[in-house]
Amino acid sequence: MAPPKHRIPPLPREEWTDEARQVFSYWGEPGAWENGSKVEKEMVMAQHPKLAMAYNGFGKQLLLDSAIPERPRELLVLRVAWRLQASYPWHFHVGYALNAGMTVEEIAAVKDGPDSPVWNGKDEDIAIMRAVDELLDTATISDETWDALARSFDKRQLMELVFNVGSYTLLTWTINAFGIGFGDEIDPLGFDLKTASGKSPLVRFRPGETEDWAETGN
């Protein structure tokens, strides 16, 4: 995976204001206030602290405070990541999906979409992936798919489902347009479910979920 060309580079250390450090340390990464984040995205977004903090607040609602249960939410994010060939959310959310109970077989089948035999009998999973595909292809959800979703999710969850697809689409645009990489300390996970160094994916914990969440799954 070739490193991207930085259109907007990580914020240089001589420009680290307190507002920028709030961006580095927003997710509770140990030592980030003093040393910066290991995640390059946070260091780039610190170029615009007000925008970064507004987006982080939105992202925190969807990642940590979502009304949608973890497993269907992670399936949704992975389908968005595959459809957009978005390596950044794929890297992180494969581990989150494993932690949420998805199997490696299911994660590998995300690329084949709702028609894969892996999803036979899993009507909720099929509806989620169809909703993602329809939103990305048509900017809406068909009545048939909406009705299928409504058999599993309440109104708040349906609202968040749409916002999740939009959020991870926006994240992908941001990563691609700004030229954001992973940073030197991350071994990125590819769509073949192998990292750049050839490792298999590991369970990943979300920010604050365990004491060592920032050190696991990199």
Image (cartoon, rainbow, N blue to C red):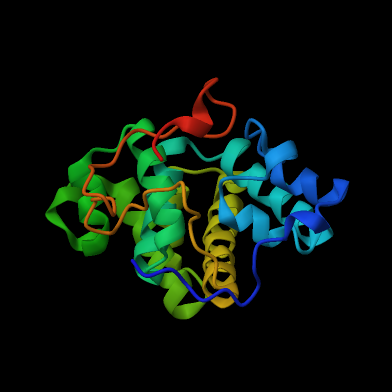
Q: Where is residue 16? Give x, y as percent.
A: 80, 52
Q: Is residue 179 visible?
A: yes
The residue lying furthest to the front in this view is 14
Q: Where is residue 26? Give x, y as percent.
A: 72, 41
What residue is shown at x 26% (from left), y 50% (from top)?
197
- In this rendering, would 36 be left or right of 118? right
Judging depth in this view, the residue of 92 and 100 nearest the camera is: 92
Q: Is residue 151 visible?
A: no
Q: How many marks?
A: 0
- In this rendering, would 103 be left or right of 211? left
What residue is shown at x 23% (from left), y 42% (from top)?
200
The residue lying furthest to the left in this view is 117
- Quarter holding residue 133: bottom left
Q: Quadrant of the C terminus?
A: top left
Above or below residue 16? Residue 64 is above
The residue lying furthest to the right in this view is 18
- In this rendering, would 135 be left or right of 13? left
Judging depth in this view, the residue of 56 and 23 nearest the camera is: 23
Above or below residue 211? Residue 37 is below
Above or below residue 217? Residue 77 is below
Q: Where is residue 114? Give x, y as percent.
A: 25, 60
Judging depth in this view, the residue of 135 and 35 nearest the camera is: 35
Q: Where is residue 74? Give x, y as percent.
A: 42, 45
What residue is shown at x 29% (from left), y 48% (from top)?
123
Above or below residue 88? Residue 92 is above
